[in-house]
Image (cartoon, helix red, strand yellow):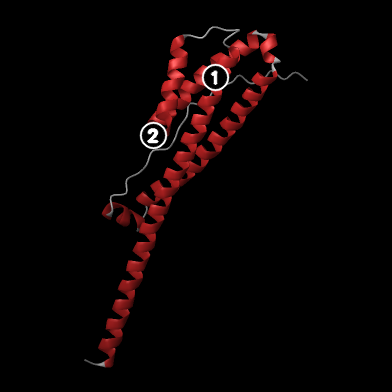
Amino acid sequence: MGIESIIMLVIIIVALLLMIVYFISIYNRFQTLKNGSLATLGQIRVALKKRLDMISQLLDSVQSYAKFEKATFEKITEMRANVLKADTGTIANIEAESRKILGNILVSVENYPDLKTSEPVKKLMDSVKDIEDEVARHRYTYNNIIQEFNTMTDVVPSNIVASLFRFMKRDYLEFEEQITKRPDLKW
């Protein structure tokens, strides 16, 4: 075995080691993104639970003015119980349903001037707005993580690692955005 054979063997071993290290780093990136998405999804769940708590408090505050069906209170209770273990599809449903209930509360608040100027109701409405912003930020972060994860499952060479370890594309968290009419601006 000559020196050329030894050098060639060392080159092959180093190349194999570099490939193994590269594939391990890709695997670790997948795991990091997966864990990041799960953590962010957890933050979204907590924020939605806070939002449901605020909606429940709003319902309590406005029920003396406006009558809400018993089913509305039961629906809020059910959503609060399920939100912390919900998957992305269920989270989207909870978000849409809670947005609908919140819309009904807002209509009630608009119909009663005393309620509109009530300090506790104002504070609760501000808190709900803050939570809405928090949910939007977390959803944006989650979807960015999922975009990178899904891209890695599509492109070479990370798609090889994805198929070897069965990393599948993940679903984006999509909420139905509330469609609001643009204000009529007259100059």
> Total number of numbered labels?
2
Residue 167 position, x and y percent, is 32, 49
Front residue of 143/157: it is 143
**SS of the residue at dot 1?**
helix
Q: Earlier in the sequence, mark 1 or mark 2?
A: 2
> Residue placed at 27% from the left, 55% from the top?
164
> Residue placed at 48% from the left, 44% from the top?
144
Residue 63 position, x and y percent, is 57, 10
Does residue 94 sit above or below 64 in this rendering?
A: below
Indicate the amino acid at tag 1. Answer: Leu
Q: Which mark is residue 102?
A: 1
Q: Residue furthest right?
A: 187
Does residue 187 sit above or below 25 in this rendering?
A: above
Q: Quadrant of residue 156?
A: bottom left
Q: CA distance from mark 1 to mark 2?
A: 22 Å
Q: Which mark is residue 165?
A: none
Residue 130 position, x and y percent, is 61, 31
Front residue of 74/186: it is 74
Horizontally, residue 85 falls left or right of residue 8, namely right
Residue 94 position, x and y percent, is 44, 26
At label 2, counting other C-alpha atoms closer than 10 Å, the crowd grade (few under 14, some 14-19, many 20 or more) is few
Q: Which residue is mark 2?
A: 85
Horizontally, residue 64 falls left or right of residue 150, namely right
Does residue 19 sit above or below 6 in this rendering?
A: above
> Residue placed at 28% from the left, 50% from the top?
166
At label 1, counting other C-alpha atoms closer than 10 Å, the crowd grade (few under 14, some 14-19, many 20 or more) is many
